[in-house]
Amino acid sequence: MTQLLHATREGETSLAEWKHFSHAQPEWYLPPENTKNGTEHRWPITTRTIERW
């Protein structure tokens, strides 16, 4: 579901760890070492996603 909601690559999604998700912000952070082009990415986490946690 995360991959569909954020349009991420399979490899990026499979490397996601709980420490990359923040309820406080709410956002999902992908560190540069986990992305294809080597740049960090941050996506907002939608209300719908939080409801499914």
Image: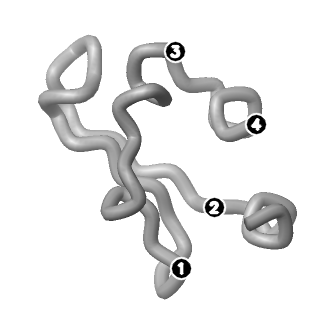
Q: Residue at x 40, y 50 (%)?
A: 42
The earlier-in-sequence mark between 3 and 2 is 3
Assign the N terminus to one quadrant of the image.
top right
Q: Secondary structure at mark 2?
A: loop
Q: CA distance from mark 4 to mark 1?
A: 17 Å
Q: Earlier in the sequence, mark 3 or mark 4?
A: 4
Residue type highlighted by circle 1: His
Q: CA distance from mark 3 to mark 4?
A: 11 Å
Q: Residue at x 36, y 49 (%)?
A: 17
> What residue is shown at x 57% (from left), y 59% (from top)?
44
Separation of residues labelled 1 and 3 (CA atoms): 23 Å
Left or right position of 53 against 17? right
Task: Identify which amino acid the numbered label 2 is placed on.
Answer: Ile
Query: What residue does disc 3 label?
Result: 10
Above or below, comparing residue 15 to residue 22 in the picture: above
Up/down of 10 relative to 6, above or below: above
Q: Secondary structure at mark 1?
A: loop
Badge 3 crowding class, 10 Å Cα cut-off, few under 14, some 14 to 19, many 20 or more, is few
Residue bearing the label numbered 4: 1
Residue bearing the label numbered 1: 23
Mark 3–mark 2 Cα distance, whole angstroms, equals 18 Å
Q: Position of residue 32 (x, y in %)?
A: 16, 34
Of pointers 1 and 3, the one earlier in the residue sequence: 3
Q: Please say if the residues under marks 1 and 2 sit with CB atoms less than 8 Å apart.
A: yes
Residue designated by label 2? 45
Q: Residue at x 34, y 41 (%)?
A: 41
Q: Earlier in the sequence, mark 1 or mark 2?
A: 1
- Please state the horizontal and vertical placement of residue 34, each as a whole percent of the image: 24, 28
CB contact under 8 Å: marks 3 and 2:
no
Q: Position of residue 27 (x, y in %)?
A: 50, 64
